[in-house]
């Protein structure tokens, strides 16, 4: 199930203007360039920001996401026709042979069910060609990033063309590690509508992720730091032998 911030049409439509800084994707673009990837599977592609960055570079991209509203936003963007969009997840993909599979931002952590996580790793493995790579990030639980997820730290008002002012803020709902749940609230000034979206993330230890990857046949080539959050995240670069 996709969170409402991706699955609700009104929220999916404003996701990009509410998150204009996507410098977190630079590390993934760098990996694609390093590996000279020609075909990429973007798992949890959302509104298609990363997929379109890749396609703009002449890379063949398949974007998959369970939220139809987000896929609709991605497909309608200029250049969206260059990407193959699939509404679904990595557990039931058509036959693919990609050079690189990615799970950017919170995608890996948003797969909270252990069985679904294992099936996702297996699905990505099967989509890769031999020698292909999977890259994704996950926050280091020891850094306790959630302690800063308060209304005071997250509140903002964004003026969106054609929509008007949108107040939005987040707050924690529950911390029961390794699971953490938070709620984002959106208030539309134009008509006063208030929408909320609850999200749950799973905080995995580095050793746990490495064991899971090895169990599915991956070789972990490298665990990098995240340039946009130095010292706070693990970026796994794993290879299908």
Image (spheres, grey):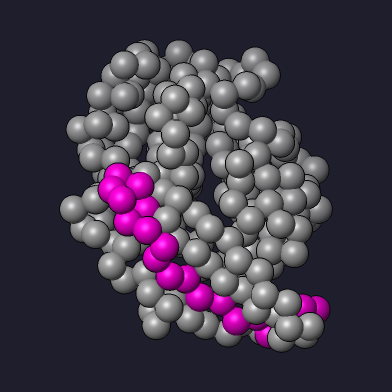
Q: Residue at x 37, y 16 (%)?
A: 216
Residue 155, position as x, y percentages in the image: 48, 81
Magenta extent:
161-180
Q: Is residue 176 magenta?
A: yes
Q: Residue at x 57, y 38 (%)?
A: 42
Most frequent secondary structure within the magenta stretch:
strand
Residue 233, position as x, y percentages in the image: 29, 51
Residue 136, position as x, y percentages in the image: 40, 40
Q: Nearer the viewer, residue 25 or 149?
A: 149
Q: Is residue 9 magenta?
A: no
Relative to 102, is 23 above or below? below
Q: Nearer the viewer, residue 206 or 98?
A: 206
Relative to 223, is 4 above or below? below
Quadrant into which the N terminus falls: top right
The image quarter in which residue 166 lies: bottom right
Q: Residue at x 70, y 80 (%)?
A: 188
Relative to 190, is 199 above or below? above
**Residue 35 relative to residue 189: left or right:** left
Can see residue 175? yes
């Amino acid at each position: 199930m996709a969170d409402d911030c991706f699955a609700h049409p009104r929220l999916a439509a404003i996701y990009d203007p509410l998150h204009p800084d996507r410098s977190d994707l630079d590390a993934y673009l760098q990996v694609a360039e390093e590996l000279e990837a020609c075909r990429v599977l973007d798992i949890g592609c959302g509104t298609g920001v990363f997929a379109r960055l890749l396609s703009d570079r002449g890379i063949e991209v398949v974007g998959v996401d369970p939220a139809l509203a987000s896929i609709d936003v991605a497909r309608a963007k200029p250049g969206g026709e260059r990407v193959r969009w699939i509404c679904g997840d990595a557990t039931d993909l058509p036959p693919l042979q990609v050079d690189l599979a990615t799970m950017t931002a919170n995608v890996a952590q948003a797969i909270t069910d252990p069985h679904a996580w294992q099936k996702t790793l297996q699905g990505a493995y099967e989509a890769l060609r031999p020698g292909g790579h999977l890259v994704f990030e996950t926050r280091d639980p020891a850094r306790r990033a959630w302690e800063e997820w308060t209304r005071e730290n997250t509140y903002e008002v964004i003026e969106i063309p054609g929509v008007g002012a949108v107040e939005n803020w987040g707050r924690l709902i529950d911390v029961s590690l390794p699971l953490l749940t938070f709620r984002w609230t959106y208030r539309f000034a134009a008509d006063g509508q208030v929408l909320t979206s609850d999200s749950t993330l799973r905080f995995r230890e580095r050793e746990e992720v490495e064991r899971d990857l090895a169990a599915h046949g991956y070789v972990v080539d490298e665990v990098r730091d995240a340039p946009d959050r130095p010292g706070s995240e693990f970026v796994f670069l794993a290879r299908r032998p």
